[in-house]
Structure formats: C-alpha cells, structure tokens
Amino acid sequence: MEIGLYSEIKQFLSISGDNKELEQIINKSSFSEEEQVVILEKILRFVKYFSMFKDIKPFMEAVYNIILKTIEVKLDSVNDVDKLFVKNALQRFITEFVNYSRMNNKDTVLDYLSGSLQKLQVQPLILNLGFLLKPMYNDEGYLNKIKGLDDEEVTYVVNTENEIKIKKRVDLWLDTQELSLDHQDELRERLIEEFDSINMTDKRGISRDSGEYKRLLGEIVEMLSLKLTVLSLMESIPEDSFLPEPLPIK
C-alpha cells in the first residue's frame, strides 16, 4: 500500500523512483505504519494542488524538497502536517520570488502578495502563487545560477557568501521565536539586536557605517516581514481548506 503511494507521489513530481529520500525519512520517524500511510496521503493531496505546473520539473523538484524538509523535522502529530506543507511552501516560494524579482521597492511585492492571496482556499492560493513562480522556474539563466545550492542559499542567491552566512544565522534565530502579528514592532527591535550581535561576533563582520550594512539590515528586516506575511496568509485560509479528502488506497 505504501509502495503505491510513494510511487504515485514521485511519478506526479517527476522524481526518479531510485530516489529513496522520502522513504528513508518516513521510515526513520516514530510514527506507526498507519500514521505513515496518513502522512503519505496528505503528501499526495498536497502535491496535487500543483497539478497545473507538474510539467515544470524544477518547480516540482522544489515542491519535493519542501516535503522532505517538512517531514524530516520531528512532528508531534500527523494532524497539522497539511498546514505545515502549505506554510513551508509559502515561506520558501514567496522568499524566492521576492529575491528573484529584485524590485527596488520589495514592500510592493509583499503588499501585492498579501492583498491578492488573502481569504483564498488553499487550491486557488497555490494556483495564484504558481502563476507568479512559473516564469522564474522557466528562466534557464536563473536555474543555472541556483544549481547545486541548498534551499537557504537559493532564497538568498542575490547576496555574497558572507551575507548568506549571516542571513542563515538570522533565519535560525527567527525559527526559534514566537511570531505574532500583534507584536511586530517588538519583534523587529529584537531582530535588529540579534543581527547586530551576529555581525559583531563574525570575523568578517560588516561596518555599521557602510552602505552594505544598511542594505543588509533592510533585507534582514524584510525576512521578518516575509514570515509575518506567511503567518497572515495562514490565518486567513479558511479552516475547511485543510479537511482531508478521501483518496483511493492502491
């Protein structure tokens, strides 16, 4: 039964059957066989949100990596895995799109995304986001540039190696914080303090008087804005979007 689900998921995403990462991660988990089947059913439901884009192989590889990253983290319950898939997909894709667009006023992008994606069911939300991402995943120059990079480096591809290192440390710090839309100003102040602390203790730290520092600080604050945008989007998705739909067990 599980073999059929694994095959269906990988076939949909154009992932080679020889790729066993998904099986290895799930088999190492502490979930029972019944719970593992439930997780696979949820994965299959999640990937089918991307049906209109399944012929874009780099897009599907990114979806697969999001799935792997989500389930390799220790999960307390299978109940919320649907929301985690959507949350992590939004976080990865919105961050990558904002950096890819390289617009002077990235707040415009965030305003557009939060405004256009609010109050949508999961399916149309993914569909709208997919149409934004489609040109990015068809851009051979961009795909060649990110080849061989890990997920964090992909989302920060416009930065130098040292800036990527700093951003990854800030990202780790953000992941440990309890994000709240009601305490944005306090979060922003603590984030800036953490950024300064990381920068000061780094042997290749950036001078606070430099234009590079001001630019990177703006991008660090933007990282928080992106996470809060995703949080806002998740809170706006109707709860019944995550109700399980029956899937045939083969």
Image: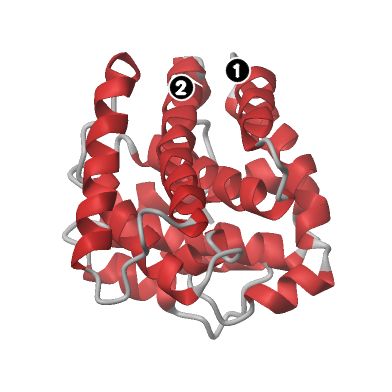
Residue 30 image label? none
Dot 1: element? loop
Q: Amino acid at mark 2?
A: Ser
Provide residue 223's location: percent of width, then percent of height. Answer: 44, 43
- How many marks are shown on the rendered structure? 2
Q: Residue 2 or 147: which is nearer the viewer?
A: 147
Dot 2: element? helix
Give the side of residue 166 with respect to residue 193, left or right.
right
Q: Which residue is mark 1?
A: 118
Q: Residue 223 or 77: which is nearer the viewer?
A: 223
Q: Which residue is mark 2?
A: 232
Q: Is residue 178 above or below residue 202?
A: above
Q: Amino acid at mark 1?
A: Gln
Provide residue 235's location: percent of width, then percent of height. Answer: 43, 19
Q: How is the image coloured?
A: secondary structure
Give the side of residue 97 with respect to residue 189, left or right.
right
Write the residue at 43% across / 55% down.
Answer: 213
Whether tag 2 and tag 1 are in contact, CB under 8 A, the answer is: yes
Provide residue 132's location: percent of width, then percent of height. Answer: 76, 42
| Residue 9 shows up from this direction | no
Q: Quadrant of the C terminus?
A: bottom right
Q: Residue 134 or 205: which is nearer the viewer?
A: 205
Work out whether mark 2 precedes mark 1 in sequence or the reverse, and give the earlier one.
Answer: 1
Q: Residues within 10 Å of mark 2 (few under 14, many from 20)?
A: some
| Residue 113 shows up from this direction | yes
Write the residue at 79% across / 46% down.
Answer: 52
Q: Residues within 10 Å of mark 1 (few under 14, many from 20)?
A: some
Write the residue at 36% across / 61% down.
Answer: 207
Write the residue at 44% across / 67% down.
Answer: 164
Mark 2 and mark 1: Cα distance apart in space: 8 Å
Provide residue 158's location: percent of width, then percent of height. Answer: 61, 63
Residue 46 occupies which quadrant of the picture?
Answer: top right
